[in-house]
Image (tube, rainbow, N blue to C red):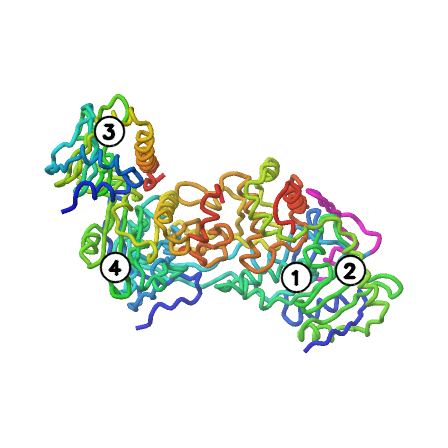
Amino acid sequence: MVEEVHAVFAAGELARLIEVLVRRGYAVVGPTVRDGAIVYDKLESVRDLPAGWTDEQAAGYYRLKRREDEALFGYVVGPQSWKKYLHPAEVRLWSAERLRGEGLPGERQGGTFRILNNETKPQAPQAFLGVRACELAAIAVQDRVLLEDKYRDAVYGGRRAGAFLIAVECTQSAATCFCASMGTGPAVGKGPDLVLTELFGAGGHRFLARAGSERGAEVLAEIETSPAQDADTQAAEAGVKQAAAQQVRSIDNNGIKELLYQNFDHPRWDHVAARCLTCANCTMVCPTCFCTTVEDVSDVTGDHAERWRRWDSCFTQNFSYIHGGSVRTSTKARYRQWMTHKLASWIDQFGSSGCVGCGRCITWCPVGIDITEEVRALRDGGGHGNS
Amino acid sequence: MATAVMTDPMLPQPYLVREVSKETPDTFTLKLAPEDGGSSSAFQPGQFSMLWVFGVGELPISISGDPAKHEQLVYTVRSVGQATNAFVSQSVGTGVGVRGPFGAGWPVEAARGHDVIVVAGGIGLAPLRPVIYEVLHHRQDYGRLVVLYGARSPRDLLYRKELAAWARHRDTQVLVTVDYGGMSWRGHVGVVTTLFKYARLKPANSVAMVCGPEIMMRFVTRELVSHGMSHNDVYLSMERNMKCAVGFCGHCQYGPHFICKDGPVFPYEQMRPLLDKYEL
Amino acid sequence: METLERILAEHPFFAGLESYYTGLLVGCGANVRFQPGSYIFKEGEEANEFYLIRSGRVALEIFAPQHKPIVVETLEEGDILGWSWLLPPYLWKFHAHAMQDTRAIALDGKCLRTKCEQNHDLGYEVLKRFAQIMERRLEAARLQLLDVYAVR
């Protein structure tokens, strides 16, 4: 049983924390600045963190701006999420070698094959540094889909079991955030191995820390910490409250399932279809979207075949293809499918909303479609389900 | 000998083609058995397998053999594109990867003690054939068996010899029709819904199982309901794009249902709010 | 041995019709039988009666110059054959070809037609019933047209 004991360590100790993780065999991944955004990548050291950077977000808008301080986690969320590692964009499931049948060399007819279960795996277990509350909620959502339903996804399961999660609480929100209304943040709940809150002020640049697991406590014990004072915990709480107060967007989830199920023919769908490009950005940046496709490839000799799994999106024309044509050919049908699945069907399928309120789909939509605005429009247009 | 155990559901098991027979100009039946000589996995009528052709791709195909004789797995496949054509073109002895069986099957257990109505359109008879086998094997556990089957033309009819043999069982009525009769067809001509008036049905005590093109299933269901059948006693086998068959790729979703694991067989009551929604 | 009257009264097509009218029809009805291969009526002929099929199978055919007639639909036990007697020009549009030994009750359409002109209540009842038959045949024909089993 891990006690909820708060400790404090100086910002400089973060480097030691990373070293401890590396010594324990983890590949540390976390935020870094690249190509004008804060993305997730392997961290060689603390210097790779986006010190002094913050992100300014709006519908269809993302810019990095310099902060006045040197906060290491002074941003909100970037275009990527941890599904990049847990549910990778590209993974080889297995390969097969053809054993030639009788006949001339190179003859393709007949013959059997051997399957080699050689899924591409990461070299070492990974430590995720900088997991936001919404991202923790997204990981829990994907856990439910990929590990706790009828079948178990071995690819996700293997990566998830080894992953060490270090959450960093938000003390600011972006204009696109709405985790408070989705009940997924900004406060971090159970699940991560370590929870950090970055603080400034009288106590200096420091981190409030608490362990969420045995191994989290062990790692924390290996760096220099001191017991947290009331001022520290209060500053952290205030920061999280401030982040919640800053949020300007929200979704009213009352009766949302009925709202979407009963408004299949609402004129609003035409309105959003006129703007949507079906570019699939939203599904790529969404931390809970899990759809994939499989691709069978073989080499020029035809003797060696591989089966790859890749991210897919319900926005593509071919996603719903069956012989004779696709079922959802119009943009309207595809946008409606995505939004209905995310906010409504997901509840029937997995017992919770598929949306964690991270706001990425709003930021990264090239035309700025706002899912919170679309929900409001469905309600205001005389839709049902406002009980 | 070791049976083919389903370990990782994403990993195909090596099977060999043991027999290939031609049913119609574009439809073939292939029988597969595990390469290691063991017995194939048992299956429920209505379940399907993912069949992998080396380097070409995978096909979701309903198992159309006898559930009591599952040493071999039997599949009837219509050649409609590159992958299906590659599959039906394989010769005896070729290796095929098999995953499964997957899905929720026909309610053969719940139908015990009732009359069974099987309505098939085109290739839809293939996923229903295991039901007919099951009922005929346990004849005394079921009431009357009515098989209504419609195909495009006489040369597209599947399992003609078996259809005749089934009709000879007691309390069993088999009615066959075609949309286009051609020159020498002396049987019934008309869509499969026209067979209903000739069928001896007792809707109150029947369970109906329907499989075929979606338009056909909608009209047949309407006909069954107009004859007094309850929405919970009519079952449909639905079809959508499938990539994984285990509920992870997301492609087969139909409303809130994953056709691969919640279906492909569904009671009409669950499908009723969805069937007339365009581009769902 | 069942009487004509009972057969007609029990048939769903005549349900709800006043017994006076059913009696009228019985008066103009007769048992008929067609050998396999014979034609009950041919396209273009005057349409004066309609049939209630009691057993056997009748094919509705269209004559085409280059080949044998094409069967568009078959009718069997319980089906009503023929409605062209009811509406002008009172000519058959298809061949009706008995494919098996077929027994039917032939009903005097010409007589019934005259009665419908005189008694519009009767006319309405008859037209209602035939409209239902036509609607079902049209629905079935449209489904046939869709060619649902074809590969797109």
Query: Which is more foreground, mark 1 or mark 4?
Result: 1
Q: Chain of mark 4?
A: B
Of badges 3 and 1, the one in the foreground is: 3
> Looking at the rendering, in which quadrant would you find the N terminus of chain A?
bottom right
Q: Are marks 1 and 4 on the same chain?
A: no
Q: Position of residue B160 (x, y in %)?
A: 21, 50
Res. A136 mark: 1
Task: Identify the residue at horizontal 18%, vertical 56% (top origin).
Answer: B168
| Location of residue A4 with respect to B203 vertically, above or below | below
Q: Which residue is mark 4?
A: B18
Q: Is residue C130 magenta?
A: no
Which label lies toward us, 2 or 3? 3
Under mark 1, the amino acid is Leu
The numbered disc on residue C112 is 3
Of all residues, the one furthest to the left in this rendering is: C35
Give the residues drawn in magenta, as a range: A45-69
Give the Cα distance between marks 2 and 4. Answer: 66 Å
**Quick one: SS at disc 1?**
helix
Task: Choose mark 2 or mark 4, whichever is in front.
Answer: 2
Residue C133 is labelled as: none
Taking A59 as reference, is C146 left or right?
left
Q: What is the distance, in whole Å, between disc 4 and disc 3 at their CAs?
A: 66 Å
Is residue C32 visible in the rendered image? The answer is yes
Tell me the CA gap for discs 1 and 4: 51 Å
**Cα distance, mark 3 to mark 1?**
80 Å
Amino acid type assigned to the residue bearing label 4 in the image: Arg
Residue A30: x and y in percent read 68, 59
Chain of the residue that carries numbered disc 1 in the rendered image: A
Mark 2 chain: A
In the image, residue A124 sits, relative to residue B213, either above or below, namely below
Are tags 3 and 1 found on a single chain?
Answer: no
